[in-house]
C-alpha cells in the first residue's frame, strides 16, 4: 500500500507537468484548430532560461520562474506572428507542417547555441529541498509546489476564459472567428493572447522540470510534448479541464507501469492509450462532436 501511495504522489507530480504543457496545446487548437508542435520546444527553452537565471545570474526561484514565463511569452507570440499568422487561411496540413518545422528549428537552433550536452540544474536548497513523511510515503516540497501550481493555473485559466472580457472573446473566436470579427472582437489580439497564456505555462513547466529532474537538453521537449498532446487528446482537445484530467491520467499510467512492470514499456503503453482513444472515443473524455458544414 505504501508503495502504491508513493507511486500516486510521483504520478501526480509528473501528470502536473504534462497538464501544464497540454493546456497550451488545447488552447491553441481550440482557437485556430492548429496542433502547435513547437509548443513543446517553448517548454524546453523555458527550462534553459531558468537554468541560466539560476547559474549565471544567481536569481531566486520565483524570479527565475517569472523571467522564464516572460521569455517564453515573447517567443510564443513571435512564432505566432511570424510563422502562423501568414498561414491562417491556408490548409490545416500547411500549418501543421509549419509547426513541425518551427519545432525542429527551435531544437537545433538551441543545440547550435548551447551545444548538445546535458546541462545539470544547480542544487536547490532551502524550502524547495525539504521532504516530509506521510506515514511511510515520502513527499518533497517540490512535488507539492508542482501540483499546487498546476491546479492554481487551471483555476486561473478557467476564470479568465469564463469570467473575463478577453475570455469571452476567446470563446467567441473558437465558435466562429468571422462572426466574432463582425461583432467587434479583435481576432488577432485574441489569438495572440492565447499564445501568451500557453507559452507562459510552458515556461513554468520547463523550470519545474529542470528543478525536479535536475537535467535538461535541447531535445528534452520532444517526448514530453508528444505525451502532453496525448493527454490533451485523451481529455478532449479544446477542453481545459480535459487537458488537466488527461495530464494526470497519462502521468499516473506512466508511473504505475514503471513501478509495477517495466519502465521500458511506459512509452508503449502511453501511445497504446492514444490509439485506443482514437478508436473508441476520438473526441476524448470531455470533447464534443462538432459537425462541419460542407
Image: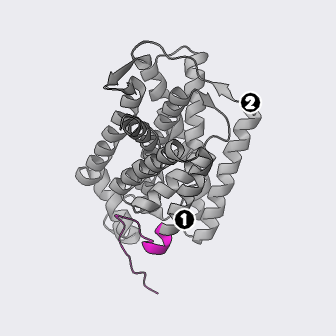
> What is the CA distance from the residue labelled 1 to the residue labelled 2?
37 Å
* Residue 140, quarter of the rendered image: top left
Query: Is residue 291 located in the magenta-colored stretch of the structure?
Result: yes
Front-lying residue, 235 or 154 = 235
Q: Residue 208: horizontal and vertical position, in percent?
A: 48, 31
- What residue sits right under mark 2 in the picture? 117
Q: Quadrant of the N terminus?
A: top left
The residue depicted at 59 percent of the width and 38 percent of the height is: 44
Front-lying residue, 167 or 43 = 43
Front-lying residue, 131 or 128 = 131
What range is drawn magenta here?
A: 277-294
- What residue sits right under mark 1 in the picture? 88
The residue depicted at 46 percent of the width and 55 percent of the height is: 231
Q: Residue 78: horizontal and vertical position, in percent?
A: 57, 45
The residue depicted at 69 percent of the width and 30 percent of the height is: 118
Could you say whether the residue bearing mark 1 is in a helix, strand or loop?
loop
Numbered mark located on residue 246 in the image: none
Amino acid at each position: 500500500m505504501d508503495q502504491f501511495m508513493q507511486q500516486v504522489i510521483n504520478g501526480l507530480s509528473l501528470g502536473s507537468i504534462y497538464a501544464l504543457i497540454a493546456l497550451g496545446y488545447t488552447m491553441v487548437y481550440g482557437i485556430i484548430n492548429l496542433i502547435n508542435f513547437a509548443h513543446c520546444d517553448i517548454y524546453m527553452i523555458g527550462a534553459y532560461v531558468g537554468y541560466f537565471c539560476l547559474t549565471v545570474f544567481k536569481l531566486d526561484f520565483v524570479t527565475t520562474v517569472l523571467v522564464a514565463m516572460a521569455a517564453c511569452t515573447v517567443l510564443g507570440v513571435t512564432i505566432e506572428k511570424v510563422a502562423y499568422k501568414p498561414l491562417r487561411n491556408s490548409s490545416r496540413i500547411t500549418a501543421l507542417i509549419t509547426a513541425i518545422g518551427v519545432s525542429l528549428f527551435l531544437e537545433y537552433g538551441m543545440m547550435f547555441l548551447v551545444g548538445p550536452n546535458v546541462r545539470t540544474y544547480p542544487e536547490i536548497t532551502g524550502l524547495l529541498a525539504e521532504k516530509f513523511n506521510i506515514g511511510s510515503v515520502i513527499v518533497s516540497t517540490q512535488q507539492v509546489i508542482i501540483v499546487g501550481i498546476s491546479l492554481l493555473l487551471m483555476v486561473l485559466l478557467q476564470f479568465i476564459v469564463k469570467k473575463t472580457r478577453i475570455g469571452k472573446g476567446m470563446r467567441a473566436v473558437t465558435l466562429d472567428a468571422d462572426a466574432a470579427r463582425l461583432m467587434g472582437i479583435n481576432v488577432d489580439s485574441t489569438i495572440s493572447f492565447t499564445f501568451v497564456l500557453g507559452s507562459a505555462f510552458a515556461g513554468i513547466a520547463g523550470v519545474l522540470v529542470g528543478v525536479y529532474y535536475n537535467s535538461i537538453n535541447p531535445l528534452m521537449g520532444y517526448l514530453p510534448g508528444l505525451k502532453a498532446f496525448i493527454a490533451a487528446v485523451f481529455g478532449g482537445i479544446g477542453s481545459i479541464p480535459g487537458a488537466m484530467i488527461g495530464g494526470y491520467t497519462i502521468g499516473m499510467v506512466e508511473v504505475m507501469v514503471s513501478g509495477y512492470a517495466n519502465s521500458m514499456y511506459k512509452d508503449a503503453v502511453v501511445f497504446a492509450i492514444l490509439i485506443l482513444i482514437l478508436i473508441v472515443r476520438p473526441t476524448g473524455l470531455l470533447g464534443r462532436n462538432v459537425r462541419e458544414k460542407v
